[in-house]
Structures are given as C-alpha cells and as structure tokens.
C-alpha cells in the first residue's frame, strides 16, 4: 500500500511541477497579439490614406465649383453690359459727342444709363460711355472728370477688359471695373465702362462653409488675399511656398505646411478662375485663384477618431485573447486538478473513488487508468491470483498497447493492441528486453535505472504510425519490481488535428481576405456614388426614394428629407409617372427629359436614365436612376436659336422692306387720287379695293415675319410639310427674284398632315435656303423636293452654287463655323438646324463638291399623334 501511495505522489509532483495555466494564458496572448496588432496598424494606415484622399478631392471640387460660380458671375455681368452697350440710345449718343458737360449728364443716353443703374443699384457704382478717343459722351457720374484715370480713358483695341479688384479710397470697399467695346458696322466707335461692387463674388466666397473652420479664399497671383471670411482685406498675404502650390492651371489639392491661417500640414483645395471670354477679354495683370482650407484639428478629426477606435480595438483584442487564454487554461488545467485530487484520494486508500474526466485526450486516458488501477487495488487483499487474471484480462482487452516488464526489463506480457501497433508477434518479445520496442532504447534504459524520473511521455513513429508512449516503473516496498509501457495509436488523431488546424488557418485567412475585399469594394462604390457629377438615386415600386447621393444638395434638398418621400413630389404636374410605371411593368431601361422643382421652387430641366432593379426571384423591386441637370444647356441652346433667328431676320430685312415698300407706293398713289377725286364714285370704287389689297399684302408679310420671329418653343400640331415649305419661301421670295435664281419645286406631301413643329421646321428650312441663295451670288437654280416615305418625311434642298470644300463638310454643323465674310451670318445656322432635327429624332445629310453646288437631305420621322412625340 505504501509503495502505491509513493508512486501516486511521484506522479502528482511531475504533473504539478509548473504553472500550466499561467503558461497557456501568456502564450495565447503573445501569439495572438502580434498578428492582431500588425493587422490593426495596416488598417489604420490604409484608412488614413483613404480619408485624406477623400477630403482632398472634396476640397478640390468645392474650390472648382466656387471658381466656376465666379466665372458665371463675370460672364453674366459682361453679357448684361454688352446688351446695354448696343442699345440705340447709347449708339445715338456718339453722333452728338460734342455736347457740353451739362448736356452730357442730361442727354438721352445718360438718362438711360441712370435708369439702368437705378434698377441695379446694388451692383453698379457708376457707368460711363466714351468715344474711341476717350471723350465722355454719357455717364451716371456727375464727377466723372475727376474720377476717370488717364489710363482708363482710351479704348482702341475693341476687347473686353476686366480690371484687378481695388479698394475705394473713401470707404475701403472693394470694387472692379468692366469695359465693353461699342461697335457700329464692326467698327469700334467707343466703349462703355462700369464700376461694380463685388458683393456677389463676396457672397460666393462667404457661402463656402465646411463645418466650423472650413472656408474659401479668393487670392491673386501675387499672393494677396482679396476675399477672406476671417481676416480683413489686405491684412495678410500668402507665402511663396503656398502660392507655388496654388498657382496651377487646373484644380487640385495638396497638403500645405502653412495654410496662411495658422494651420500646419493642412489639406487645401484650389482652382484657377478662368474667365469665359478668354479669347476676347483682357483682365488685369493678376490672375485669380480660389483656395479652400480648414483647420487641421477639424480636418483630421475623422483620423483621430479612427485612431481611438483602433486603440480600443487593440485593447478589446487583448481582453478577448486573455479571456480565451483563461478559458483554455481552465479547460486543460481543471481535468489535471481533478486528476490530482482523485489520485490523492486513491493514494490515501479510497479505492472506491472514481475519476470522471471525459476530455477524450491523454488526461482522460490517464484518469481511466487511475480508475482501472483503483478497481484492481480493491481486490489486492482478497485474491492475488484473481487480481492477476483480472489484470491480464484488462490489459488484453484494453484498446491501448501495453507491455509489462520485470525488474530486469524483460517483457513478461504484451497485449494484442501492442502487437498490432508494433507489428510483431508476442513470441518475439516475451522474455526479451523491452528496449528495442522504444524509438530511443538508450533513453528508456537510462530512465529505468532512475525510477524517480518516471513516468516518461513521448511519441514515436513506427512506419506510417504515430504512437504515443507512456513508460513508468512498477515498485513494491520501495524497490523497482518492473515497468509498464503503454502505447496508443494516435495517427488518425494527429492527422485530424493537423488537418483541422490547417483548415482553421485557411478559413481564417479566407474570411479576413473576403471581409477586407468586401469593405474596400463597399467603400469604393460608396465613394463613386456620393462623388458622382450626376444625381444617383433608387426608388421602390411605389416611387419612394430609398437612396440618393449628395449631389441632390445642389438642388437645395437634403438627402434625409427626400428619402422616404415619393419622387413625384418634386416633379412638375405634367409628369404623372407614365414612363416610371412603364419601366416597373416592362423592366426596360429608359432615357427621357422631365421638369422638376428645386428646393426654391424653380423649375429645372433634367435628363433621366432609369434602369430596373432586380430583387428576389428575379422580380423588379424598384428603379435605379441617374439624373443630369441640363437647364443651363437648354438656356444656351435657346439663346443660340434666338440669335440665329435674329440673324436670319437681318438677312431678310432688305427683301421684307421691298415687299412692304412696293404696295406702300401704290397705296400712296391711291390716297392722293382719293384726296383729289374722292367725290367721284367711280374713282372710289376703283382705288379703294386697290388700297385694301395693298394693306392685305403688307399684313401677310408682317404676319409671316412675326410667326418666324416669335419665341421658339416646341409646339406640335397637325401640319402639311409642303405648307411649311411654301410659307418659308414667302420670306425669301424677294431674294430669289433679286438674285436671278430659278426656283424648282417638286412637292408631294400637300395632301397628308402629320404632327410637326411649324416654327422649328420653318427655321431649319429658312437657314438652309438662305445658305443656298448666298452660295449663288449671280444666278443659279434652287431645287426643293418633298417625299413621303414609309416611316419618314424627306425634304431635299439643292443649289448650283459654289459648293462646299471637302475639308469643311465635317465642320459645317459646328457652332460658329462659317466661311462667309465678317457681318454675314453668325455661324450658328446649320448648327442650330442640326440640333433641331436631331431633337425631333431625324437627321441632316449633305453632299457637295466645289463648283457643283450642294444637296441637303432632311429626314424627319412621321408622328401621327402627340402621344408619340418626346422632346
């Protein structure tokens, strides 16, 4: 009994010699913390770079948008002053330029200027008109002789001029001047100079607010800050280092060591102010630039927050690893503690105590061995022989391989499991040394001679098998009476453990890589959507906004106030959702133009591109839409159409005057005759009908002219194509006769009526007919043919004029392209005509060779009802 107790105590000392729990916890924390720390550091560096690039790109776009607004303001001022400069009152004043000072201040032009200024008192300080020698002919400034500087008087080169911003000597308010040339028959006759307040530009700069400290500045190329929301004008300047970053031709962003407002390593955005009239405009010596800055503490706040999150994540990971380590230590250490307590009870003689440790590993096996040992010890005092047989039976039936040796280390028993593991028959080992059964016989031999170093645990590879071996001695009375070697085939266990570990590591890598990829893709797509130049949105099947990007803020709306609202709430009443429901029902992509209200209630023209969104079971769950604001584009197109109409009217003026003067002459003769012989009834019966006929002729000419000159607007109704052609020819009838031109008509559409826009088609036909007449300066043949094809209406207009050079055919539809002399045409006629026909869904084709005339073919799709028309 004492020998058994001594053996158990020796085993417990070996097991509890070191703090297993502390070792497990520290190992898991150290091994897990290193890759976690490295991963957090990499995420922090990458996220910091992404945030910095995003902030820089945003500042760049803000600076570019502000510069564009200043461009638009200056452009509008120039256009407004140009309209004033070409007014009849101004031009008439140059003919009376020798007036006294008193008459200058009170002449019609000065009165006109004062009225103009009074309507825009918030913009203009003074407006002065001078002839080309610098003499003032009209002004709103009663003290103009003292206020005009000598260098500002002469204006002989005919260009637009914008001065640098300067400050009023009295109240230190900033101002600038714009000079507009005044021409008569393309000859410079003088100029109009206006001194403006720059409050509008101030407001554009002041409107830029980014959080609490972010704002925009307007600076010049010499480093002076012209407009700053923080510092007074001319109170500070920008360092050469910062100016070198800002003075570039294109918008950009950078990190500046000094942002001129006390910030260090600030992110700044910048953009040059490029005037819209660069080719005809002369500005001051200084260039203007917009740059946007924000205090670094505010700019880098997201990065600081990210750093805090990263640090907290690291602390959390340490806590998690520590918790897992403690859990693992308890998982492994508790069975050992139970084993220790149970062994102590058995060692004290409580052989009925049983260890319940079901871990499925070596500790569980050892606990089972202790339980078996306790069972065996219970019968030691009753029947030694029965115990021996029972022990042999257990050894033979146990799943582990067991070899028992005597005190001379010769095998006295080997069970079938050991035979199978070693691959030998027991007859080859019984009575022989057990040392060859171990992979390191010299080690086991050494230990057998030093029983205090047993038991000894090791693993041994036998062929393709991995065997776990526990070698221990058998003592009695303090003497070594033998030894036992327990073997367990753990090949499958080791293989499964290895495969499980490899699979776990592979799975962790896959999850990490996939998570990172998904996050990067999400961030990238989110950045693309939010920073797109168009409004991007999604709606459900009911038309309710489910997403909308920040571009909507340019229309005055916030994202949160539209999400959850119907899209129809911002559309004008003429859009009732016909195309929306068609996309939802048929699942088709559509591109069309609509009108909507911005936040201020202003109507904006927008082109919508909508595509269906597919949900579960391939059913349409809503629509993805991309909206582009074309309001300004339509305004410019409208101005081009208007300008071309005015130019065409100018070219028709001579013929119209002739058409009116001819009947007027006859009418005057009739009136004279009626004055002298009006009492004669025969005279009245003869001349009154002639007088009425002349009036109707004049009425017809004026009606056609007014119809052509009225405001262009798409107005579809039923018309005959030939009717439009014939009415157009009435406007050029005199030019055809005066130019000795033979007119050949082959019209075949007079009996059919289709949905057409009378005004726009008349403008197209008139532009091409006038070009054809001008191409035949002496004489020629003008041919017009109309055809009614299956799906289209075709009009062919040909001439026998000088033709179009091959190099110019590809350019004739470009805006402002012309080969005519200065003063003849605007270069917009064919461009406007091409745009009108393209808008109607048709096309214009041209064929020509020099000296053989030109042929223009206009093809227009047939429309039978207004429902089929989309503009």
Image (tube, rainbow, N blue to C red):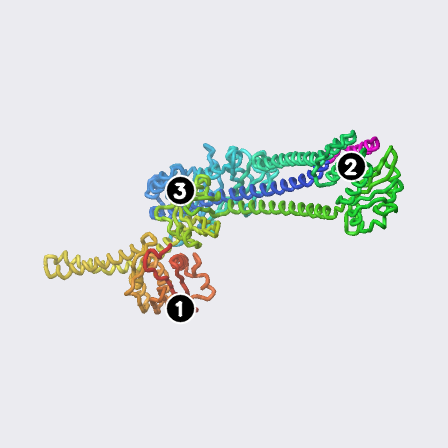
Above or below for 846 versus 468: below
Q: Is residue 185 left or right of residue 418?
A: left
Q: Is residue 345 left or right of residue 289?
A: right
Q: Which segment is the magenta one?
A: 1-23
Residue at numbered disc 2: 376
Q: CA distance from mark 2 to mark 1?
A: 124 Å
Report the quarter where the C terminus lies.
bottom left
Q: CA distance from mark 3 to mark 2?
A: 125 Å
Q: Residue furthest bottom?
A: 852
Given residues 719 and 570, the one toward you in this image is: 570
**Nearer the observer, disc 3 or disc 2?**
2
Q: Which mark is residue 128?
A: 3
Q: Secondary structure at mark 3?
A: strand
Q: Are marks 2 and 1 in contact (CB under 8 Å)?
A: no
Residue at numbered disc 1: 853
Q: Are marks 1 and 3 in contact (CB under 8 Å)?
A: no
**Nearer the observer, disc 2 or disc 1?**
2
Q: Secondary structure at mark 2?
A: helix
Given residues 794 and 141, the one toward you in this image is: 794
Q: Secondary structure at mark 1?
A: loop
Residue 823 visible to an observer of this rendering: no
Whole-percent x, y for residue 431 in the image: 88, 46
Given residues 333 and 577, the one toward you in this image is: 333
């Amino acid at each position: 009994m004492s020998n058994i107790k001594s053996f158990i105590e020796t085993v417990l000392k070996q097991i509890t010699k070191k703090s297993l729990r502390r070792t497990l916890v520290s190992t898991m924390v150290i091994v897990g913390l290193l890759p976690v720390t490295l991963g957090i550091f990499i995420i922090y560096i990458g996220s910091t770079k992404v945030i910095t690039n995003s902030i820089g790109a945003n500042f760049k776009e803000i600076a570019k948008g502000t510069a564009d607004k200043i461009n638009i303001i200056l452009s509008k001022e120039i256009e407004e002053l140009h309209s004033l400069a070409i007014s009849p009152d101004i031009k008439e004043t140059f003919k009376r330029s020798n007036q006294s000072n008193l008459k200058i201040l009170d002449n019609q032009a000065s009165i006109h200027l004062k009225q103009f200024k009074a309507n825009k008192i918030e913009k203009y300080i003074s407006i002065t008109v001078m002839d080309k020698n610098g003499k003032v002919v009209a002004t709103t400034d009663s003290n103009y002789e003292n206020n005009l500087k000598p260098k500002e008087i002469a204006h002989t080169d005919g260009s637009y001029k914008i001065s640098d911003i300067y400050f009023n000597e009295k109240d230190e308010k900033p101002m600038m001047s714009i000079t507009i040339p005044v021409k008569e028959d393309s000859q410079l006759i003088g100029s109009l100079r206006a001194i403006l307040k720059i409050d509008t530009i101030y407001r554009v700069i002041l409107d830029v607010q980014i959080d609490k400290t972010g704002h925009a500045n307007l600076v010049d190329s010499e480093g002076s800050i012209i407009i700053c929301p923080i510092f007074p004008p001319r109170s500070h300047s920008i360092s050469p280092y910062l100016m070198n970053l800002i003075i570039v031709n294109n918008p950009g962003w950078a990190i500046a060591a000094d942002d001129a407002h006390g910030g260090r390593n600030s992110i700044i955005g910048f953009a040059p102010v490029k005037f819209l009239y660069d080719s005809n405009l002369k500005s001051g010596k200084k260039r203007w630039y917009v740059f946007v800055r924000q205090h670094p503490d505010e700019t880098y706040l997201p990065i600081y927050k990210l750093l805090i999150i990263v640090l907290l994540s690291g602390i959390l990971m340490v806590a998690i690893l520590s918790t897992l380590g403690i859990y693992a230590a308890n998982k492994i250490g508790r069975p050992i503690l139970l084993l220790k307590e149970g062994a102590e009870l058995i060692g004290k003689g409580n052989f009925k105590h049983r260890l319940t440790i079901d871990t499925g590993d070596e500790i569980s096996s050892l606990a089972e061995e202790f339980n078996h040992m306790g069972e065996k010890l219970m019968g030691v005092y009753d029947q030694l022989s029965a115990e021996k047989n029972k022990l042999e039976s257990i050894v033979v039936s146990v799943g582990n391989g067991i070899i028992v040796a005597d005190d001379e280390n010769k095998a006295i028993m080997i069970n079938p499991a050991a035979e199978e593991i070693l691959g030998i028959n027991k007859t080859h080992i019984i009575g022989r040394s057990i040392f060859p059964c171990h992979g390191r016989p010299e080690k086991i031999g050494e230990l057998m001679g030093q029983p205090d170093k047993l038991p000894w645990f090791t693993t041994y590879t036998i062929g393709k098998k991995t065997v776990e071996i526990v070698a221990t001695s058998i003592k009695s009375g303090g003497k070594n009476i033998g030894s036992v070697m327990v073997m367990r085939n753990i090949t499958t266990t080791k293989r499964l453990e290895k495969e499980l570990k490899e699979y776990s590591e592979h799975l962790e890598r896959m999850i990490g890589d996939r998570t990172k990829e998904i996050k990067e893709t999400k961030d990238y797509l989110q950045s693309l959507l939010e920073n797109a130049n168009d409004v991007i949105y999604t709606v459900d099947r009911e038309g309710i906004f489910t997403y909308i990007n920040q571009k909507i803020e340019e229309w005055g709306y916030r994202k949160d106030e539209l999400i959850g609202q119907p899209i129809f709430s911002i559309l004008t009443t003429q859009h009732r959702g016909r195309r929306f429901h068609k996309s939802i029902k048929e699942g088709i992509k559509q591109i069309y133009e609509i009108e909507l209200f911005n936040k201020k209630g202003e109507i904006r023209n927008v082109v919508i591109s909508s595509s269906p969104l597919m949900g579960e079971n391939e059913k349409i769950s809503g629509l993805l839409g991309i909206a582009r604001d074309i309001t300004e584009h339509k305004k410019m197109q409208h101005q081009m159409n208007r300008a071309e109409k005015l130019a065409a009217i100018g070219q028709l003026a001579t013929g119209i005057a002739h058409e009116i003067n001819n009947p007027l002459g006859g009418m005057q003769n009739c009136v004279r005759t009626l004055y002298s012989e009006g009492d004669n009834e025969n005279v009245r019966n003869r001349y009154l009908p002639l007088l009425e006929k002349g009036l109707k002729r004049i009425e017809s000419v004026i009606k056609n002219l007014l119809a052509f000159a009225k405001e262009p607007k798409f107005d579809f109704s039923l018309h005959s194509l030939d009717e439009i052609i014939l009415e157009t020819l009435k406007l050029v009838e005199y030019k055809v006769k005066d130019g000795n031109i033979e007119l050949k008509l082959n019209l075949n559409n007079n009996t059919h009526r289709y949905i057409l826009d009378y005004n726009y088609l008349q403008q197209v036909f008139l532009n091409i007919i006038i070009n054809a007449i001008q191409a035949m300066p002496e004489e020629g043949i003008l041919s017009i043919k109309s055809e009614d094809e299956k799906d289209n209406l075709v009009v062919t207009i040909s001439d026998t004029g000088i033709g179009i050079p091959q190099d110019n055919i590809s350019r004739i539809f470009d805006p402002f392209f012309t080969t005519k002399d200065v003063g003849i045409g605007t270069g917009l006629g064919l461009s406007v005509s091409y745009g009108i026909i393209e808008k109607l869904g048709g096309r214009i084709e041209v064929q020509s060779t020099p000296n053989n005339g030109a042929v223009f073919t206009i093809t227009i799709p047939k429309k039978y009802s207004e429902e089929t028309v989309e503009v």
